[in-house]
Structures are given as C-alpha cells and as structure tokens.
Image (cartoon, grey):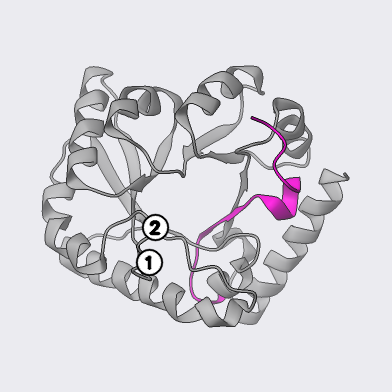
Amino acid sequence: MDLAANVEAIQQRLNAACDRAGRDPSSVELMAVSKGHPPEAITAVAETGIRLFGESKVQEAKVKIPQCLGNLHWQMIGHLQSNKAKDAVHLFELIQSVDSLGLAQELNKRAEQMAKTLPVLLEVNISGESSKFGYGPESVMAELDQLNALPRLELHGLMTIAPWSQDAERVRPFFRKLRELKERCEEKLGAPLPILSMGMSGDFEVAIEEGSTLVRVGTAIFGERTYS
C-alpha cells in the first residue's frame, strides 16, 4: 500500500473542502488515526510530514509509542476508563475523550501528581446514540464550570463521532450542532475553545465545511487495521 499517495489524496480533499468553505487549509489539522497499525506504518506516514497521531487504547499505545519516532505528537481519541488515567496522562499530549466529570477529576489528580497541565477535549454524543460514549449536550453545559475549574486541565474544545452513513451529507446536521454547542460553551466561559475535532475518513469534508479544526483519518490513510 502506498501510504504517501493516500496522505497526498487526503490532503487534496482537505484543501478542496477548505476552498469550498472559504477557509485557509492551515486552519484544519490532519490527525492520522494509527490504532491497529504497527510502528513501521506510522513511521512511513510520519515521513510524509504528518506529526499528529491518534490512539484509542492505552495498552496498545504504551507498547507502540516508544517504538516510534520521538518527534511525533500523540493524542488519546478512544474511550478512557478512570483506571487507565495515570498512563494516559503520561503518554498523551491531549485527551480528546473526556466524557464525564469523574474522569476529568481523575485526570486532574494524575496530572497534579505529575506536575503537568493536561489539555483536553470534551467528547459529546451529539447524535444521542446509545452505542456511543460522550456527554449529552445539556450535560456539557451543566458541568462546564466545574470542568473548567479543575486546575490541572485545560479545556481546548469539543469532539464528536458522527453516526455512520454512506451519505456524508446526512451527518452534516450533527457537525453543525457540535459547532453551535462549542459557541454556547465559549459564551458561557467567556473564552475561546480553539479545537473542534470532528470528521473521519468518510465524512471529514462535510465536517470541515461545518467548522472542524481537526479531522481524524485512519482507514483512508492506513487501510484496514492489521495490528493487534
């Protein structure tokens, strides 16, 4: 598989989506979702210039990250259990999947122990699907002040996983709702939330048109998962 050609194709699609939305392509960061792929594939993708990688499982990341280039940036995008918080704070520069006040408090405690500040995103289940993790939109608003008061966490924005659909247009309303929720959060906090993480291999162009600042692309770069 020609990973460099895959990255080039994604970059062209990203640029075209930005063009349609009247946005500067530099306003959207491309994350390569490396879960299920070996260190060799990550190195090949890093050689194209991508530096941001996303992992979903703490145990897998713990094994893989030390085997990869040292100048890469790693973010946690999968569901995180509180008992894995210590390792997650150690391994990742940012955690995108904070979905409860309890998890946030545990991350804050672990970051305090390591004397570090941890940037986080709040994961929102914008579609309300029972199969997905994440805050409900109103729960985000209700707990926002408590989350923002945690001294070792920095709220950088929101993340969502849209419902799967063969027609990306059908998920546009969910991306729009997340953007509107981010605007409500910013108004309540009186501060900007710079990251809106939404859009994956099948729908990232629509997400960009709706305001995404970070797209998480796995299969369209790496192909199907091979690593366990």
Q: Secondary structure at mark 1?
A: loop
| Residue 95 in view here | yes
Residue type marked 1 = Glu
- Residue 132 is labelled as 2
Q: Name the residue at 18% across, 40% down.
A: 102
Classed neighbour count for the residue bearing mark 1: other residues with Cα under 10 Å, few (<14), some (14–19), many (≥20): few
Q: Where residue 134 sits: x, y (%)?
A: 32, 55
Answer above or below: position of 115 versus 174.
above
Q: Nearer the viewer, residue 68 or 72?
A: 68
- Residue 117 is labelled as none
| Residue 190 in view here | no
Q: Where residue 31 sits: x, y (%)?
A: 59, 48
Residue type marked 2 = Lys
Q: Are marks 1 and 2 in contact (CB under 8 Å)?
A: yes
Q: How far, Cα to Cα, is label 1 from label 2?
A: 6 Å
Q: Where residue 62 sits: x, y (%)?
A: 51, 21
Q: Is residue 15 magenta?
A: no
Which quarter of the rendered picture does the C terminus lie within? top right
Residue 143 falls in which quadrant of the image? bottom left
Magenta residues, start to end: 209-228
In the displayed orientation, state which residue is furthest to the front: 130
- Which residue is identified by label 1? 129
Answer above or below: position of 170 versus 109.
below
Classed neighbour count for the residue bearing mark 2: other residues with Cα under 10 Å, few (<14), some (14–19), many (≥20): some
| Horizontal relation, residue 203 to residue 87: left or right | right
| Horizontal relation, residue 5 to residue 11: left or right | right
Q: Secondary structure at mark 2?
A: loop
Answer above or below: position of 62 versus 124.
above
Q: Name the residue at 30% across, 60% down.
A: 192
Q: Nearer the viewer, residue 138 or 27?
A: 138
Q: Name the residue at 45% across, 25% down.
A: 91
Q: Where residue 11 sits: x, y (%)?
A: 73, 59
